[in-house]
Image (cartoon, rainbow, N blue to C red):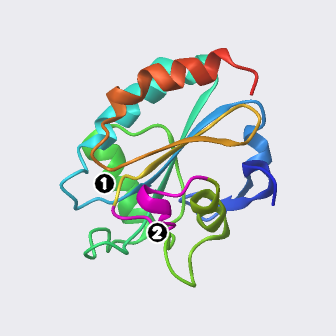
Amino acid sequence: MTSVYDFEARQIDGQPVSLSAFKGKVLLIVNTASKCGFTPQFAGLEELHEKYADQGLAVLGFPSNQFGGQDPGTNEEIGAFCMKNYGVSFQMMEKIDVNGSGAAPLYQWLVKEKPGLLGSTAIKWNFTKFLVGRDGQVRKRYAPLDTPASLSRDIEAALASSA
């Protein structure tokens, strides 16, 4: 696999989507959870979506229950929670594993492209974020502590770039 566009995922309603549908957009890919201390970041992610979507940003949320069982609900429950509590209108995807042998192929690729501290390929916690340029390549990885608002400068640079 050579770019994010080589992957498929499922939307939260179960419908398959080829990530090639996002060709030419800047992507912010985030593993999310509904019952985490970082869950309020949904509001910041929605703000980024509202501010930059018209310029070509697509936020993709991938729920995962791998960290302390903090997203135990069904896809339907997760979608309803995100909409009711945070007004999420960005693209939420089906719940996946982001670590281990059962990790979604997209996440296996993301962590190889942008390892974490000391070369770690594991996702450490909910709300780890990956910024992907218009060329489908991973530009940057952010820790859960990095707030959505703190990514604005990098998002703007990615939106201004053809790569």
Residue 119 on the magenta span: yes
In screen coordinates, is 18 left or right of 91? Answer: right
Residue drawn at point x = 53 percent, y = 59 percent: 12
Residue 26 location (% of width, % of height) = 64, 32
Residue on which disc 1 sits? 81
Q: Where does the magenta region start and end? A: 114-125
The disc placed on residue 122 is 2
Helix, strand or loop at mark 1: helix
Residue 155 location (% of width, % of height) = 52, 25
**Quadrant of the image containing the C terminus:** top right
Residue type at numbered disc 1 = Phe
In screen coordinates, is 145 left or right of 12? Answer: left
Residue drawn at point x = 34 percent, y = 71 percent: 73
Residue 25 location (% of width, % of height) = 69, 31
- Residue 102 to residue 53: above or below: below
Instruction: Count how many numbered circles sit on residues in the image.
Output: 2
The quarter holding residue 6 reads bottom right
2 or 1: mark nearer the eye: 2
Residue type at numbered disc 2 = Ala
- Residue 136 to residue 115: above or below: above
Residue drawn at point x = 51 percent, y = 66 percent: 121
Q: CA distance from mark 2 to mark 1?
A: 27 Å
